[in-house]
Amino acid sequence: MNPFGYRNGRLHAEDVDLADLARETGTPCYVYSRSAIEERWRAFDEAFTGRDHLVCYAVKANSNLAVLDALARLGSGFDIVSGGELERVLAAGGDPARTVFSGVGKTPEEMRRALEVGIACFNVESEPELQTLNAVAGAVGRRAPVSLRVNPDVDPATHPYIATGLKESKFGIDIAAARAVYRRARGLEHIVVKGVASHIGSQLTDVSPFVLALERVMELVGDLMDDGFDLEHLDLGGGLGIRYADETPPEPVDYALALLDRLQRFGSRYQRLKLLIEPGRAIVGNAGLLLTRVLYLKHAADRSFAVVDAAMNDLLRPALYDAWHDIAPLQLDESRERRVYDIVGPVCESGDFLGHARELAIAPGDLLVVASAGAYGAVMSSNYNTRPRVPEVMVDGDRYHVVRRRESVSDLLAPESRLPG
Ligand code: LLP
């Protein structure tokens, strides 16, 4: 379902006219659709029907409390990568017992808090981390539930910055060394081995790397079972891609069928393993957009620029990954002249662009939307150039709620101080 569509030439989010919303909230502004987020979560959940499973939404993709709240109400699990994300899950009413903790650099303080609230599992990414976790768990008088995140050395065929399952990546433990690390983990008093985890990368548009990774991980699972480990779950990570331009990523149901089909071919001792998945982008990516207003049209010798009020600090993906996001006007107006523009922001960097060479019929003051901005949009924003972070709005049917207010410049200055004296 695409929650965004034109009615009488005016772009709506569900039943809300985005021009009305922009008038009230101002621009720039992130807009999310609650029903689109919920529908995508359910699509994953239903796709694994018949198998014990838990969809652990990857909080990093969009950690707004309202997003987490909506998903928590559906019974979602969560994948977190910091103590801050853990506090968000708790504040949004999420269940720590359905929360897994990933990431290569968990601190002892983060481990302690996660143990105290009783998270489901630590996805441990190195042996030194395992030692630290064992010590912290001993100090708080708990046993830490653990999966080792193994690195299956699979090429996910995605942008190198978001590929994580290759041998040379900093993530996970080399799958060839993992069996020995599991054996040593068994000797640690305050560690309980629960499962095996892997995640190979993000924005994958084909199921085959997922299936290949699963096969490699299942070999390890077999070895571990032979070694007498009583594994409860298998965490297959996130990474399913979305359509930004003309990609044709599998639907959650196709992704699930491919994995379930492959799993079925393993023996019966594997069938009681609970499956965890950690989708982020595929749940929220196409459920959000960034609203922005054209400030100026600027015609230089060999190109034209549309200077808009959103910038790389609001949506970093184009500048960082050369990512392509569709850019469209809020109101269709066929009478205007179409021209090719670079859509750029006010930040003082040549890399500050939202799109290159886009043909648009626009005038100063027009509203534009940058599409597919629900994932890795607001969460990656910064205050560069002392630009306050923009509001986030959740549309729900014909209503909407401002779920993060616009920052003020005083918010930005508050933590700072001048020199003494
Ligand atoms: N699980 C783990 C362990 C991860 O590292 C990630 C993403 C996910 C799950 C969720 O992946 P997803 O389903 O969203 O693909 N900022 C980049 C994406 C970075 C992804 C990092 N890890 C972007 O804007 O494309």
Image (cartoon, rainbow, N blue to C red):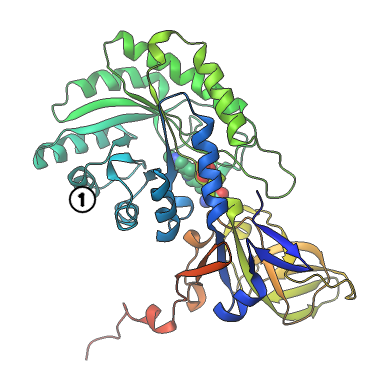
Say which element carries label 1: helix
Residue farthest along the front direction in this orientation: 398
Could you tell me residue 246's position as x and y percent? 75, 45
Q: Residue at x 58, y 30 (%)?
A: 255
Could you tell me residue 322's position as x and y percent? 65, 54
Residue 409 in the figure: left or right of residue 244: left
Residue 185 in the figure: left or right of residue 381: left
Could you tell me residue 122's position as x and y percent? 29, 37
Residue 275 in the figure: left or right of residue 120: right
- Asked whether residue 309 is in view, the answer is no
> How many residues crowd around disc 1 within 10 Å: few (fewer than 14), some, or many (20 or more)?
few
Residue 356 in the figure: left or right of residue 185: right
Q: Is mark 1 within 8 Å of ligand 1?
A: no
Could you tell me residue 240's position as x and y percent? 57, 38
Residue type indicated by callout 1 = Glu
Q: Residue at x 58, y 23 (%)?
A: 258
Residue placed most toward the observer, 211 or 150: 211
Residue placed most toward the observer, 261 or 241: 261
The quarter of the rendered structure image containing the C terminus is bottom left
Q: Residue at x 23, y 87 (%)?
A: 420
Q: Is residue 419 above or below residue 66?
A: below
Q: Is residue 321 above or below residue 8?
A: above
- Asked whether residue 176 is in view, the answer is yes
* Total numbered badges shown on the rendered structure: 1
Label 1: which residue? 109
Quadrant in the rendering for residue 208:
top right
Quadrant in the rendering for residue 398:
bottom right
Residue farthest along the bottom direction in this orientation: 421
Q: Residue at x 40, y 78 (%)?
A: 412
